[in-house]
Amino acid sequence: SQQGEEDPQALSIQEGENATMNCSYKTSINNLQWYRQNSGRGLVHLILIRSNEREKHSGRLRVTLDTSKKSSSLLITASRAADTASYFCATEYNFNKFYFGSGTKLNVKP
Amino acid sequence: DVKVTQSSRYLVKRTGEKVFLECVQDMDHENMFWYRQDPGLGLRLIYFSYDVKMKEKGDIPEGYSVSREKKERFSLILESASTNQTSMYLCASSSRQVGGLYEQYFGPGTRLTVT
C-alpha cells in the first residue's frame, strides 16, 4: 500500500502544550497534505507541502517534509481545546488522486 | 463560502436495497471523489471523476457504481446493499490544475447503516 500512515494513533495533551504527529509513506509523491476532521464531520484542509519544499508554516501549524525518509510531521503549537480532532495526512501518488492515512486522534484537555 | 453538500447525514437501508448517495458542489470543480471511512482503515477511495461522464475506479469499487451527468453532481450507487457496506461515506471535490493546489473540499459525510 502507498498509504500514508500517521503516528501516534492517539495523543492526549494539556492546553498550551505543543502537539506533534508524524506521517510516513512508501512511494514518491507530488505533494503531501494535512487535514483535520472534527468528530463525525467531513475533513478540512489545513496545509499542503510540495515535494521540493522542506518546511511550511501556517499560523500555529508547522509542517516538515523529509523525502529521503518518506516522512512528514505536523506540529501544532500552543494547542487549544478546539484543536481536539483527528488529523490525517494525504499523499498525492498520481495526478489528483490521494491516499489518506488512518489518522492521529488528538485530545487537548482544557 | 465554498460548499460540498451530501443528500443525507444518516441513512438506514435493508440488505439488497439499491441505495443512492448524492453529492453536490458549488465550486465548479472538475474533480469529484467518493471515499468510505472505517475505523482503523482511514479513507479509502471508491471512485473518482475528473469530468462529466468520466470516472475511474479507486481502491475499492466492488459493489459500487457512480454517475456524473452534470459537473456539480456526483452520485454513488450501491446496487444491492450489504451489511459490509455499513460505513461513513465522504464526498469531496477539487480543481484540476497542473502545478496548482489540489486541496480537496469535503462534504459532511453520510453515515449509512445496512441492516
Image: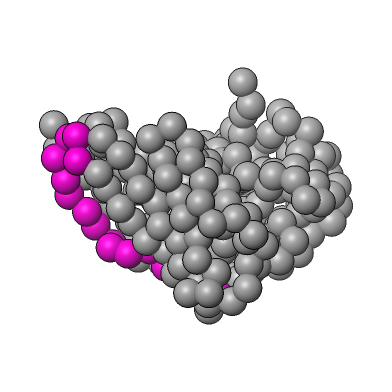
Q: In the rendered view of the protein, which quadrant contains the C terminus of chain B? A: bottom left
The residue lying toward the viewer, choosing from A73 and A109, is A73
Report whether B72 appears left or right of A83.
Answer: right
Nearest the viewer among A36 and A27 is A27
Quarter of the view holding residue B49 = bottom right
- Name which quarter of the figure residue A97 lies in: bottom right
A44 sits left or right of B21 in the view: left
Residue at image point 30% right, 53% down: A20
Q: Indicate left or right for A55 with B68 as reference.
A: left
Give the percent coordinates (x, y) of residue B58. 66, 67
- In the rendered image, residue A16 lying in the magenta stretch gets the answer yes
The relative height of residue A67 versus residue B72 in the rendered view (above or below) is: below
In percent of width and height, residue A24 lies at 44, 69
Residues drawn in magenta: A2-17
Q: Is residue A89 left or right of residue A106?
A: right
The percent coordinates of residue B25 (x first, y second) are: 69, 34
